[in-house]
Image (cartoon, grey):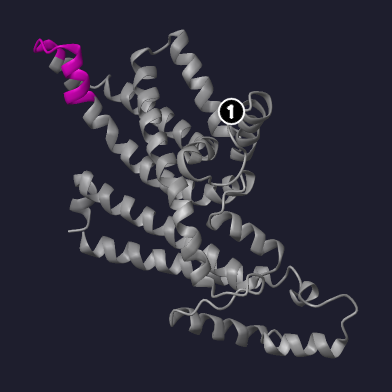
Amino acid sequence: MLSFIVKRVLKGLLCVWFIWTLIFFLVRLTGDPTGWMLPDGATSAAVKELREAMHLDEPLTKQYVDSLGDLLKGDAGRSYYYKQDVRKLYSERLQNTVRLAIPAFIVAIIIGVSFGIIAALKHNTIFDRVLMMITIIGHTMPSFCFGIILIIIFSVQLGWLPTFGTGRGADAWKHLVMPMLTLAWGPMSSIARLTRGSLLDVMTKEYIDGARMKGLSERTVLIKHALRNSLIPVVTSVGTQIGNIISGAVVVETVFAWPGMGQMLVNSAKQRDFPTVQYGILLVAFSVTFVNILVDVSYGFLNPKIRESFK
């Protein structure tokens, strides 16, 4: 098992390094950031001086090596657009992203698992078909489309909820509702479909029939035998959905002008703010990879076959 964990961590670190390297070169294909940093009509000498000050005149390979070396030392650089240390910028925005992501994750689990169980128990009924139709729409509809629909209904038409910002005081929850539901929409649908399929599969097993033959109530069979065994693949999916929520926050925060990491990452990309974009993508990649490693390791503990194969 230890060998499995070490290999998985090394692969994860290699994946993060590859993503950061890819982003480093891709952002530099978008153009020269000095174009918006200088006033119109700036002389070529002024442009050259600014590029030298930002080390953009150096060969790309040297920029890469220097940037990677600084990153390994804990220095993510200084933002071109915000004129602040990049790490400090993201640390200030992190709490807003966490404030949005955690409730969305909890809602996705509770509603997703509940919908999946109910749909399995009401298999082939109208209720089951309606729930599955909702989850299919949630699985295929982009989050920004769902967010816009919520804005049209609850803000434009009904005027119940605000469309942007985090809010303060007693009304802060109103600002959270729509972005949270939008972020939870896709993961909730995936969890519901997997829970339903897994529970239906377990209910056909021989040991479930054996438990019924012993005279156990249907509730006991469901909770003690069927549900416990059906949740193993759901646990794996739930861990994966954490990564989807982290990456999905980029879009949702932009739609609702939520001042988190995602919104700042998008704004920085528009301004060709290389250090801010690179560090933001690095944080997202590291978070998703870290969660996937935890899921793989936990699945190894839950599944004896995987644990035995790495002894």
Disc 1 target residue: 160
Q: Please check the rendered image and state whether residue 22 is part of the magenta-colored stretch, yes or no.
A: no
Query: Quarter of the image containing the N terminus?
Result: bottom left
Residue type indicated by callout 1: Trp
Which region is colored magenta? 212-226
Q: Is the magenta stretch mostly helix, strand or loop?
A: helix
Judged from the image, the secondary structure of the residue bearing numbered disc 1 is: loop
The number of callouts visible is 1
Q: Is residue 180 above or below residue 81?
A: above
Q: Position of residue 113 (x, y in %)?
A: 36, 29
Q: Position of residue 212 (x, y in %)?
A: 15, 13
Look at the image and tell me whether residue 263 can be seen: yes
Q: Position of residue 129 (x, y in %)?
A: 48, 15
Query: Quarter of the image containing the C terminus?
Result: bottom left
Please indicate whether residue 179 sits to the left or right of residue 231 in the image.
Answer: right
Q: Position of residue 302 (x, y in %)?
A: 22, 44
Q: In this view, does 18 lie above or below 218?
A: below
Residue visible at 18% across and 18% down?
221
Q: In this view, does 116 lie above or below 297?
A: above
Please indicate whether residue 308 sits to the left or right of residue 249 in the image.
Answer: left
